[in-house]
């Protein structure tokens, strides 16, 4: 495991160096721990009134950091928020899943090629430098070469509407998030006005305003399949790729795997899918659940797919089509913004006309 801390005062650097112990509950198999601190001279600062924590836990090969920094960290920092990033990534997928990073094999997915040849230290410098540029107050990056090991849920807690593999991928993701949250609590990173949990393959396409999520006792999420279209069948479900918690909701909810496996309420038994679990748990905790408009959390899931065996990997967005952009049925990224983010993306397709676009995966042959 490697930790990156920064920027800090010299006193903070010394404290982190002296107290830089790895939490044993992280179950890491790494053989070394390295703390990297970039200090700055002490200066008097008034504590910002609002604090945002962003947690990302997943696989390095599925991570798209720049849209997160550009559309969440940057706007929040500019608006006066103190933004702390906590990112935990595994460099290799679990053997439980045949070392495959992707459950959605039908997209013919490949790892994000941007980081294929990065060493650990190069990736650290890349991410920490970009986070600092976009205004992150503190960046904590955890990299491990073996994924966490989690047991199967109790029989009554197995999701009935999905495969066992997807159940275990969900369990691994929830535990990875919980491990980061526990580490934050044990090391004094508490009292955030807003905590945002972001899946590593999320690609934000427009700015997020964290001031919309400051109700302390509320759990926020986007409705499932409710961006650029309206799917009434799934409108009551939570899109769990981005979860947002108010100040009191975060500590009540973020021991996610423990709550799933051990919460005594029978209302959490035999649920159909993870998208049901989050809203049900929030209600069991006495929290308000707010399914927000799609443009409050404007993102698509992204991946690189290999359309043909001999072609280079192509960046694309999941769960949509160009028709949803041209004729949106609900809140959606504007055509102007879509062209803008495509022009900023090095891996966007460039057409003969010179226009760059990020296409939708579903518009190419799938398995």
Image: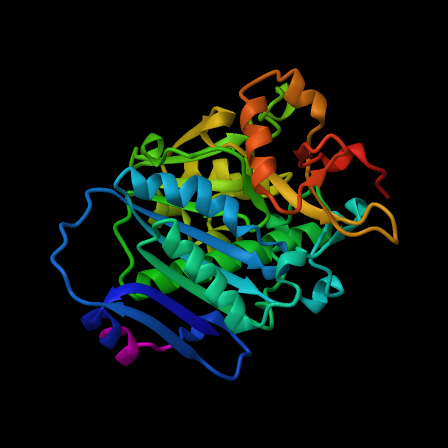
Residue 100 lies left or right of residue 248; in this view the side is right
Give the magenta-colored segment's residue range.
Answer: 15-21
Compared with residue 357, is residue 132 higher up or lower down, i.e. above or below? below
Q: Is residue 328 left or right of residue 43?
A: right
- Is residue 78 or residue 365 the one in the foreground? 78
Q: Is residue 262 visible?
A: no
Q: Is residue 238 left or right of residue 315?
A: left
Placement of the C terminus among the 4 image quadrants:
top right
Which one is nearer the viewer's eye here, 350 or 202? Answer: 350
Q: Position of residue 53 (x, y in %)?
A: 35, 50
Quarter-wise, where is residue 323 in the image? Answer: top right
8 vs 178, nearest the viewer: 8
Q: Is residue 20 magenta?
A: yes
Position of residue 326 relative to residue 260, above or below, is above
Looking at this view, name the residue that lies furthest to the bottom.
31
Residue nearest the observer in this picture, 142 or 160:
142
Q: Is residue 310 magenta?
A: no
| Residue 306, image x, y percentages | 80, 49
Residue 304, horizontal then vertical, whole percent: 71, 49
Q: Residue at x 48, y 53 (%)?
A: 56
Which residue is at a point 42% across and 60% down the rendered structure image?
129
Q: Residue at x 68, y 57 (%)?
A: 113
Residue at position x 58%, y 54% in the image: 63
Q: Is residue 297 visible?
A: yes
């Amino acid at each position: 495991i490697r930790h990156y801390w920064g920027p800090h005062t010299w006193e903070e650097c010394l404290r982190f160096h002296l107290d830089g112990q790895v939490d044993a509950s992280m179950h890491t198999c790494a053989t070394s721990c390295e703390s990297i601190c970039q200090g700055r001279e002490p200066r008097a600062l008034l504590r910002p009134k609002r604090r945002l924590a962003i947690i990302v836990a997943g696989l390095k090969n599925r991570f798209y950091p720049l849209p997160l920094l550009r559309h969440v960290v940057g706007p929040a920092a500019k608006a006066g928020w103190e933004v702390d990033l906590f990112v935990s990534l595994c460099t290799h997928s679990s053997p439980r899943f045949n070392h495959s990073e992707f459950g959605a094999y039908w997209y013919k997915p490949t790892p994000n090629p941007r980081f294929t040849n990065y060493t650990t230290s190069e990736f650290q410098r890349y991410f920490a430098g970009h986070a600092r540029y976009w205004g992150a107050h503190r960046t904590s990056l955890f990299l491990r070469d073996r994924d966490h090991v989690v047991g199967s849920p109790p029989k009554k807690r197995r999701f009935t509407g999905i495969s066992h593999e997807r159940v275990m991928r969900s369990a691994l993701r929830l535990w990875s998030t919980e491990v980061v949250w526990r580490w934050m609590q044990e090391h004094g990173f508490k009292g955030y006005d807003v905590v945002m949990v972001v899946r590593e393959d999320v690609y934000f396409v427009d700015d997020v305003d964290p001031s919309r999520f400051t109700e302390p006792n509320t759990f926020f999420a986007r409705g499932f399949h409710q961006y650029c279209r309206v799917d009434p069948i799934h409108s009551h479900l939570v899109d769990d790729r981005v979860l947002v918690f108010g100040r009191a909701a975060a500590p009540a909810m973020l021991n996610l795997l423990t709550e799933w496996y051990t919460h005594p309420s029978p209302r959490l038994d035999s649920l159909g899918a993870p998208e049901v679990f989050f809203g049900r748990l929030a209600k069991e905790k006495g929290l308000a659940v707010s399914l927000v408009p799609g443009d409050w959390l404007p993102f698509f899931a992204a991946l690189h797919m290999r359309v043909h065996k001999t072609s280079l990997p192509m960046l694309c967005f999941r769960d949509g089509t160009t028709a949803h952009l041209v004729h949106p049925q609900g809140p959606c990224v504007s055509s102007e913004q879509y062209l803008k983010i495509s022009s900023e993306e090095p891996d966007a397709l460039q057409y003969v006309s010179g226009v760059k676009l990020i296409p939708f995966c579903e518009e190419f042959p799938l398995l």
